[in-house]
Amino acid sequence: MSERVLTPRNRGFLFLDSHPTGCERLVADMWQACPDSASVPEGAGPVALIIGSSSGYGLAATLAGLRRAGIRGVMVSFEKAPTERRTATAGWYRTAATAGIARDAGRDLVFLNGDAFSDAVKDQVADLVERRFGGRLDHLIYSVAAPRRTDPDTGTTYTSVLKPVGRANRTRTLLFDDQGVAEVREVETGPAEDDDVEQTVAVMGGADWERWIDHLAGRDLLGEGFTTAALSYIGSPLTAAIYRQGTIGAAKAHLEATARTLDERLGRTVGGRAVTSVNGAAVTQSSTAIPGIALYTGLLRGVLAEGMVPPVRQLAALWDQLTGAAPLSLDDEGRVRLDTWELTDEVQAAVAERWEAATTDTIDRLADLDWFRAEVRRLYGFSVPGVDYTAPVVTDVPWPAPDLAR
């Protein structure tokens, strides 16, 4: 067993190692923060497939689905195992912790580690649903953020980019040096070129989501009333040029168009629904890579403090709507909106005022930097309250194996 003391080593927002105990405690804290519901008898919960279950909103969807709906089923993510030189990725440790919670709750969850874009993983999932879960899938949550995707039909690999469309964009962004000192810097991102938009849509749009539905429907695995939701984000006008109006925004528009197509099809074939769920701002491994988003999120926390709604509570609300515990509430574009707390005129005006005033000298009083720094570190299992970081920790935690007795 590999056991050592782990200290955070990072390059900007990217950490080189993850802390197993910190990740486990973080998952336990998320579990406790999720509103509970009436007890669902063991074996009676709906069968769910969550794609991208190990981090961000996908992890929140997994934990909220367990606590609110008593889900069973298959969770898919793509994580790296520990090696002699490196710990596993944080998602590996979070998955192990989630498996322990599911086991204690008496829920049959199977965790697959593999490329969700591949047909091989789709076949594995279909086989599991058929053999282990009675051949009926009730819900699918799609939460995938990836830099590239290989099309199984053509073998072509597409790469997503974070660029504005039409012209270059200058925006403020938030950076931290090695000592954690904050700097507000203006950065310029050049416009999308050649096939940047098409490549990004091919990775982050709705093509793979629809392929999953095709694959499962082809095996006759979609139950009557089947619902599916792809997790998305719109965000503030302050970040629109690089996000909603940029290459990623084009992918999100494609995702929403795919939802409308799937919704019509599922309604006709199995009496089901397909929606996109627009979530609110949060510190995630994906969001910290986007210019301006870190600054915006820190300022938003400065305005709202504890009024920010954490992902696990947002996803609890989504599960209530998908399972019928609450009415399905859609906007004019057919989207579930879990971001309304963030986008009120009052909140956005307050954030915009701080955005204009934000400099390296003023950022300490305008944004909640202590919270933001800690949130970034917690993504990797560091700065989690209640963890002794001076103690050695076992890093070669195994991937959760399915309970073959079930």
Image (tube, rainbow, N blue to C red):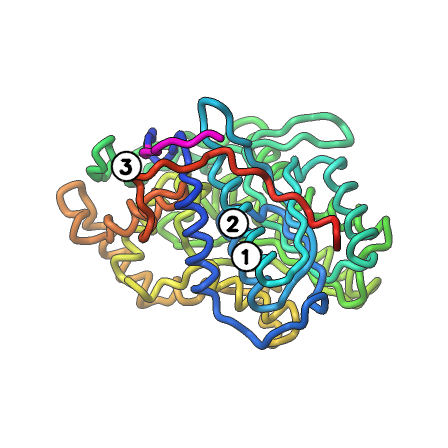
Residue 363 % position (x, y): 19, 47
- Helix, strand or loop for disc 2: helix
Q: Within 10 Å of the Cα at label 2, are there few (<14), some (14-19), or many (20+) other Cα atoms?
A: many
The magenta-colored residue range is 1-8
> Quick check: 232 left or right of 302?
right
Q: Within 10 Å of the Cα at label 3, are there few (<14), some (14-19), or many (20+) other Cα atoms?
A: some
Query: Nearer the viewer's eye, disc 2 or disc 3?
Result: 2
> Quick check: 338 left or right of 237?
right
> Quick check: 220 left or right of 61?
right
Q: Which is nearer the N-term, disc 1 or disc 3?
A: 1
C-alpha distance separating marks 1 and 3: 35 Å
Circles 1 and 3 in contact, beta carbons < 8 Å: no
Return the residue at label 3. Answer: 175
Return the residue at label 2. Answer: 97
Q: Which residue is pictured at 66% across the width and 46% down the height?
A: 206
For badge 3, the amino acid type reads: Leu
Circles 1 and 2 in contact, beta carbons < 8 Å: yes
Q: Which residue is pictured at 71% across the width and 32% down the height?
A: 151
- Asked where in the image residue 45 lies, by quadrant, the reply is bottom right
Q: Which residue is pictured at 78% across the width and 52% down the height?
A: 129
Q: Which residue is pictured at 59% across the width and 37% down the height?
A: 78
272 is within the stretch colored magenta: no
For badge 2, the amino acid type reads: Ala
Return the residue at label 1. Answer: 101
C-alpha distance separating marks 1 and 2: 7 Å
- Helix, strand or loop for disc 3: strand
Residue 249 % position (x, y): 52, 46
